[in-house]
Amino acid sequence: MDQNPVPGIMKTSVVMVLLGMLLVAPHALAQQKTVTGKVTSEQGAPLSGVSVILKGTNTRTATNNEGSYSIRAAVGQVLQFRLIGTALVERTVGDADVIDVPLRRVALDLDAVVVSALGEATERRAQGTAQQTIRGADIAQTQRENFVNALQGRIAGVDVTSTSGVPGASASIIVRGITSISGSNQPLMIVDGLPMDNRTLNTGLLASDANSNTALSNRAIDFTNRAADFNPDDIESLTVLKGPEAAALYGIDAANGAIVIQTKRGTAGGGVQYSSSARVEWTGAKPQLQRVYGPTTVATDGTLGSFFYFGAPYPAGTRFYDNLDGFLRKGTAATTSLSFSGATADNRINYRLATAADKQDGVVPSSGYGRVNLTAASQAQIAPWLNSDVSMNYTYDNNDQVYKGTCGTISTCGSLLGPLIDLMLWPQTDDAKDYLTKSGLRRRLTGLAASDEPDNPYFNVNKDKINAKTSRVMVNLGLLVTPFSWGSLKTNLGTDAYTNQNLVLRNPESATGFSTNGVLDQADVVTRNLDAQTVLNINSQPLTRSLSISGLVGHYISDHKTTTDAVVGTQFLDPNFVSINNTNQRTPQPTIEQRRLVSLFGKAVLDYRNFLYLTATGRNDWTSTMPPGASSFFYPSVSTSFVFSDAFPAIGRFMTGKLRAAYAQVGKDAKPYAFRPALQYKTTSYGGYGYNFWGPNLSLRPEFAKSWEVGAEVSFFHNRLGLDGTVYRKVTEDQIVNDVRGSYGTGFILFNLNGASTRARGLELTVHATPVLKPTFGWDVVANWTSAGQVVTGLPRGIPESYVSDTWLYGNVRNGTMVGLSTMSLTGFFYLRNNQGDLLIDPTTGLPVRSNVLSGNFVDRGYDRQPDFTIGLTNSFRYKRFGLEFLVDIRKGGDVFDATDHFLTTHGLSLQTLDRDQPRVIKGVLMDGKQNSANPTPNNIVVLPSANPAYYTSMSEELFIERDINWLRLRDVQLSYELPQGFLGSRNASVFVKGTDLLLITNYTGLDPIVNGNTAAVGGSGGVGIDFGNFPMPRGVNFGIRMGF
Amino acid sequence: MHRRLCALLVAAFGLAAGCHDFLDVNTNPNGPQSVSANLYLPQMLHWLVTSPQYDGRFVGRYTQEWTLPSLTLATALPTTWDRMGYDAGSDNGGEQWRDVYWSLGQNLVDMNAKAAAEKRWDLLGVGLTLKAWGWQVLTDLHGEIIIKEAFDESRTTFDYDSQDYAYQEVQRLLDSAIVLLRHSDGAVDAGYLGKGDHIYNGNRVKWLRFAWGMKAVVLNHFSKTATYQPDAVIAAVDSSFQDNSDDALLQYPATSTDLQDYNFYGWTRNNIRSYRQTQFVVGLMNGAQFGGAVDPRMSRMLAPAADGQYRGVDPNLGGFGALTATQQPFNFFGYAGTAGSGLPARYLFADRSKLPVMTYAELQFIKAEAALHKGDQPTARTAYMNGISAHIDFVNARNLDAGQTPTQITGAEKTAFLADANIVPPPGNLTLSHVMSQKFIALWGWGHNELWMDMRRYHYTDVVDTVSRLQVFRGFANLYADNQGKLVQRIRPRFNSEYVWNQTGLSAIGALAGDYHTKLLWITPP
């Protein structure tokens, strides 16, 4: 909105109606009194954060840390006590001024209040769609700096993949599978009703990425996903709206689901909360390298010819250095948070002020993450009919990462390998720690050009640099007007504004920086997202004696703009001074991206006797990113909920349950500037303009997804055992595929085209159980079971294969998919076989023939990274003052490409190259023209790998894609103890010890099957499951204390 | 109080829906959608000169200008290109395909349309010349190409046009360009053109000569066909470059951080660090093929070994073979292994060296060849001597471009060389072998497209006459035909453009066959 003036008022009539509403005098209020009380658990422990609501009004408060509350109410009014995970309790205000309430933990409570789309509170019984909520406390207790990582295993249908174990690594979150082949599959994030940016910086914004010689292509580098800026301690609750059905009201951005976060507010007598924890981290897994055979070529002066190890055996008595051992260090992390909260005695004003500081030093040298959060939130009842709600959140974070993997084979940015690969490649007969010469320069071992010799790993982590600093402010102003009894009007105005400064250094002496005497990328990303939303809520109105209707209409407008000032500098003057001012050649490349969206939406809920609900929604979006005529689109949803245990009391005696079904359509627009090509300034001799890669597509249309789901929620034994199951099916049609290649005869290289389609199906099952519930001992179990699959049913223009080029990061394997394949498939230059399925062998070399030799095409061999199912199993035990909780994350199936092992094999370092002196005949048939005849010639060519290292170096990556990888991972385990009251003068205090990722049992032979060869910025299925030189998740143990004063 | 609140809420709610102006923010602010016509030109001229060098890494191995040996193994399997093969599933050898269809592509269409609308006849003339250049180099490299259906972004597959049609189209475009470049009326303006033209700085007359030069090249390619007209070739040469000052050269400023404006062969770009000169080219210059006359250009163009001697590598070996460490030729920058960072280079191979796309010497050799075909020995001899003399000057000039190490060839050396009967035979005795071998030297290292066309016209090892059995390309041997004995005749169309996405079109011209690269071109019949 900084360019165009605020457009004129739409229709005078709307304004008049609004004015009319507001001028209605508030109702006279009945005689009120102050009710106080204490809310406790079934064990008698005080429960904080319990919402106490005057039923049918907006008056509410919450219990403090001692479980106490205070609220103004009139006799005859009803107080509701709500806390996620407990059964709803209602008490009518009578003569007593004190009402104490025990809340009972339940597995499933249809009367529980849940957050639905737009952050509206609804009763669970009315929900016709699948969603799942976690309490903020459960997220915070995982001690994960990036709260997104806390979600893995806790919600059915949600899959979180951290790019690596380096502090600040980006995390990808996928709800219900990959359905977009090339675009983003990340869900919409909503905080207190307005969107929160969760972007991961795409290296395409770096000025060095414009050229394939220096491009990093989201491969060798990673940046934090922006949701990590959020302080996990500020989260009151987090709800995942899984399908388009649940998220339909959020429209265009919620096609991949939505994550709705409510932040904490102050409560009367909240006091001071202090918590502090410290963590130690270490890496358990370690690759094995052979120590029998030495380098392939060694000059007479001892200089190495290369870092290949196909040479003579090491002489006896050779001194070896365990370079791997000393490299990774003990990581440490410390977190401190402090909050003050409180409310006025009449609860008309509450506040919460919080601050938190995180400091993390990763297990990889030079990696670290630090964050400071400042949060303030206050609600005020300005008048009986007017409430305000303000929250402000400031974050500063500072992240140092290290390189990983490689820049890849499409573009070869020198020999940029991550330090882990460098470490394995470095000769074991040389002490890698000694990485500088006496004069302080890079110590070299080979006669290769400096740009062709891989870096020493210590040089890599000490002399190269990836730093990101972010300063972010999120402000949300809310006004709630209740001028009449039948409804309320809620307006939120918000901004999410941040400056993200990135610095990427390739040292002048490093392999990748040498050619240009250093490469320094600087990219300052300035994002300012403005959002405004107004919702008119209409309370339930009876239509007949048994039928009532409620609903809302709303309006949303957003203006999201990101400006990136990027510059790349080369030709360093002082090789050690890191500043653009120190570079002799500089190329700036600023980028602006803006998108505006205007929406109107509405929802109506029909309620038949509180057991049958029908919800219909509709939303119309107008987006700035589509061609004129295609920019407006409408989509409806309808869902129904049937509480059969209430409808048939005979059933309700021994169980409660509901059935639900929903159908929705949701549209999706293109990214900005997708349909009309622009010229770009060329860096070739004497500049000038020329078209970028993308050709025009003026007929670009929005894509649509149609989705339906049915589900059931049942509970038994007084809600001690609850089951929630959902089956869904989602079909996307006319999907926009970005960066589709075509014949250059078009005049262009890439197009953004409609025409892909995908079909997703899945089954989600959540079981809550409370096997033991005694005053001194309790045991809760939550199990989330997910099975999902997505297939591609069409590609634009009949193209044979679609892939995201950034994923072509190692050798010749990429996330290619074809019609009929999974969206998580991998294609590659795999081995050719005859009709009988025998390997074809080259008659001259005796080695197998790969697909590129004939057609040059990437082929499918049935590789699929999609797991068969995943299980997240949480067990919580409470015994007196002790608590024990652990989360086990289980996965069955899904392929992982161990590119690291392929790399080690082709360099003669893998243990499986030790039998290189064994002559062998590869089983197969010769490709001599008779391979498909009745009598193919069996291969009889003897290969001696030690004499012909091509046996290893030409191996297809196919042999290193490990099929059906299973794992069992102990994600979190925590033991806590509540200290006796009065400890150090506190009102409450507890200590805990916690382990993260302590145990991994897997059939994967690499270091860690949870990997992403790219980052969360890459669209489609991305580089998940491509493991090349990625640092595994470290194991960690936390010690912490929480105290309240 | 109420009123103020009302105003606030109304402001929030009043950001009205469906407002067209509000949503009109999708014009890409990062780049214009169209620019002044001359601003399209610089990058197209860059690719005019540079694009052939990308493919030259591969074509130059077919022509044995250079080879890519293993630097560590004495013998190894020679590379596919050294064996006259190709890399399946790779875009190697497809750079000119990319640049003609994309870097020029729609940019050239737009520029020409604007130039025509604005009566900028000089710019339009340059544009049509570029267009002709594109079709000519592509059809020479690949044979059948996409012309009639090109630049239709709504198509998904494309039909190929014949080489005959391509050559007709090239001549039609050049004829139009020649007419236009003669005009000085309309909005013809050297200042305007010069803003985008860093080859001739807007000099229309030089572009006119360039168009004539291209016409000469094109007409000369018909030498094996019935329609060959040597007189037309000679006339075109005479209308083209008058001396070395007309050479079409591009300077590489070498200031961009992404190295795109560096000389493609310079050390920094790291494209030919491991390449080495062949026995063939050394044999043409060390006296082996010219009766012991050592070419003064050898020590200014080629790379010595550590012992100071000039030797070539046998492309059949895949390595240096029996050459000892001190005998192995240095890289083209003049250093061992892949070294040379920041050090002065040689000839065309410095980061800031100028590279040509067409030279006066080249055209004089073309004239000499045509005159020989016509039987006009005196004309041939003059042109031949002009060619050698001009190229000696060219070598001197290039070695001054970027502070290279070789010394200048003195006037005395030049005179002595031209007086050597082994190089310039007595009148009446000039043969195609003299002309084509000397042309090879003059185009060595940059004129890969033309050299390969010459070699294919003379079937690599054709002889001048059946009596002397002297090869047109003296000493060209060691053919390692990796194609069941067939010689390479064309490069397959670019993989990532055609083999992946235009199989229908490929199928129609037989390009899906594994030995398509050995299929003779229309213009070089047996």
Image (spheres, coloured by chain):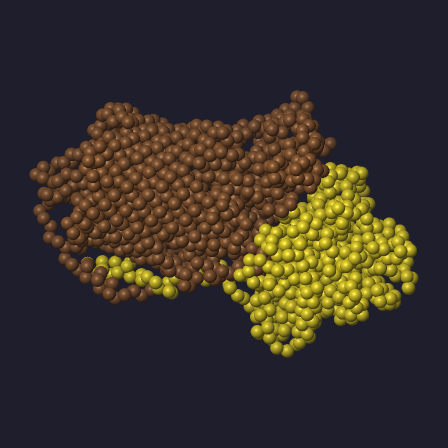
Chain colours: A brown, B yellow
Q: Where does the image place residue B48, in percent across and percent down from the top left? A: 66, 60
Q: For this rendering, which residue is in front, A861 or A278?
A: A861
Furthest-front residue in this view: A934
The quadrant of the rendering that contains the N terminus of chain B is bottom left
Q: Which residue appears at 68% of the width and 70% of the height?
A: B172
Q: Which residue appears at 66% of the width and 42% of the height?
A: A449
Question: To which quarter of the image does residue A339 belong?
Answer: top left
Q: Where does the image place residue A783, in percent across and percent down from the top left? A: 35, 33
Q: Which residue appears at 67% of the width and 26% of the height?
A: A918
Q: Indicate whether A1037 appears above or below B77.
A: above
Question: To which quarter of the image does residue A766 belong?
Answer: top left
Q: Indicate whether B448 appears above or below A91.
A: below
**Count of number-bearing discs:** 0
The quadrant of the rendering that contains the C terminus of chain B is bottom right
* Left or right position of B207 against A858: right
* Left or right position of B320 against B185: right
Q: Indicate whether B203 appears above or below A675.
A: below
Q: For this rendering, which residue is in front, B34 or A578?
A: B34
Q: Where does the image place residue A57, in percent across and percent down from the top left? A: 18, 48
Q: Which residue appears at 72% of the width and 50% of the height?
A: B345
Residue A310 visible to an observer of this rendering: no
Q: For this rendering, which residue is in front, A760 or A343?
A: A760
Residue A652 visible to an observer of this rendering: yes
Furthest-top residue in this view: A317
Q: Where does the image place residue A690, in percent across and percent down from the top left? A: 57, 61
